[in-house]
Amino acid sequence: MTTTQKPRLAIYWGASCGGCEIAILNIGDKILEVDAAFDIVFWPCAADFKYEDVHGYPDDYIDLCLFNGAIRNAENEEMAHLLRRKSKVLVAFGSCAHEGCIPALSNLTSAEETLRIAFLDNPTIDNTKGTLPQQVTQVPEGELRIPQFYNTVMALNQVTEVDYIVPGCPPEPPQIWAVLEAVIKGATLPPPGNTILGAGTLAVCAECPLERHEKQIERFYRPYEKTPEPGLCLLEQGIVCLGIATRSGCGALCPQVNMGCRGCYGLMDEIDDQGANMISSLAAVVAAGELGTDEDEIERKIEAAMDTLVDPAGTFYRFNMAHSLLQRVRTGMNGHGNGGAQ
Amino acid sequence: MRRFVLLRQMLRQFGIERERVQLVWAAASESNVLAEAVDQMTEQLRALGPLRWKQRVLHDAHPHIAPIEPDVTPADLVSAKEVSA
């Protein structure tokens, strides 16, 4: 570390997979420019920093903090508050910090159920003693504590104020570099306050080269069930693609390799709920039958078509559950316990 | 109809009772159909009680969490309508 006036950069992870850190490294040799431009003052994934280092910094010491990962437990939240206090600019980096992402899919069940599946009832687990993580454990050396596991996974801006959001699972490296380069060159950023950086404003469809022909479908197919016709819109072939309800900025990478958009750049401006938006959009491509068909027959046909769509909630809120209108399921209705931390 | 079928399937996953969201067709000449459907739905919702999602489902969520507004349930709406009528 040098003692020059370079801006100070911190990168931290909450509940995340590590993909955001890899995406940062995927900006290639430009990472050297990042190193040259910033003093890295906290980045546990890449350099040996401790909590105490951050606690020792004065408030607003960090110029730019990229926080990836969702708020899943008390440690994530504590670090979110700490880094907010120590940072001039706090960025929710990647889908988990932005909107909950894959970790927030566990909002489809309870904390108890999540732990049960992860530690007890799982074909790849051999936990004959039924050991579960305990928040407090007595050992000969004293008392061991681990952070409280929350029932509901939250996005970063649901626990603290966020200046900017860089969407994506993970954010695409060219978009990451565009944001970092703007900071390095001292460009004027838009006003802070949950402001989206490094993404577009239109739907993914606007960047997608696949052709649409306003065709309607009789049923949906899971990716393994169908080889798509090249060059044609996946949704119109019955392959669920969330491009129509998802913010652009990725370059429509997934549809171009025959994988429907998963929705990772989140909802667009002016949209309150990505899943509801997707229901509206999807409904338009499902065939309802000829004009004059009997109403019951129409309903039966639509139900049959919709039944081929496995797990609508998990599909439409794969990335956006924490920011959805409902935010989580009500448990206790279906024998799945009633929500752990009550 | 298409949106409704899909919405109903998804709301079931969220643990919301089927009776809370209903779609009933009634032509302009079928006022009795509409009235019966409203009566029936009112009774069903009254039996279920208010949803109160924010308090009952997001109860452990952090206070920073954005409140779901308005905090009104379909049952509240139906009973409010009855009172005003």
Image: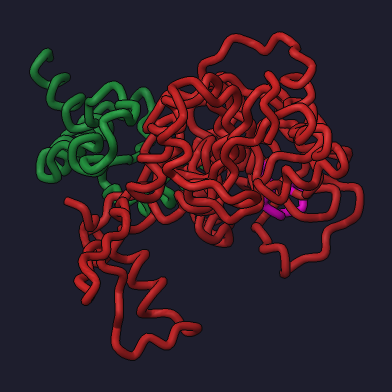
Chain colours: A red, B green
Q: Quadrant of residue A177?
A: top right
Rendering coords of residue A105 (x, y %):
46, 53
Tell me if residue A224 comes above or below residue A68 in the rendering. Answer: below
Q: Quadrant of residue A190?
A: top right
Looking at the picture, tell me which residue is in the foreground, A204 or B62. Answer: B62
Residue A55 falls left or right of residue A90? left
Whether residue A294 appears in this view of the structure is no
Residue A231 falls left or right of residue A116? right
Rendering coords of residue A302 (x, y %):
55, 51
Q: Quadrant of residue A27?
A: top right
Rendering coords of residue A252 (x, y %):
79, 40
Looking at the picture, tell me which residue is in the foreground, A250 or A303. Answer: A250
Q: Residue at x 76, y 36 (%)?
A: A35
Q: Residue at x 54, y 51 (%)?
A: A16
Residue A35 falls left or right of residue A323? right
Question: Where is the C terminus of chain B found, in terms of image quarters?
Answer: top left
Q: Residue most toward the right?
A: A231
Rendering coords of residue A206 (x, y %):
79, 29
Tell me if residue A219 comes above or below residue B16 in the rendering. Answer: below
Confirm whether the magenta stretch covers residue A236: yes
Confirm whether the magenta stretch covers residue A213: no
Q: How many marks?
A: 0
Q: Residue most toward the bottom?
A: A128
Looking at the picture, tell me which residue is in the foreground, A284 or A192. Answer: A192
Tell me if residue A321 comes above or below residue A164 in the rendering. Answer: below
Q: Residue at x 42, y 42 (%)?
A: A52
Whether residue A167 appears in this view of the structure is yes
Span colored in magenta: A235-242
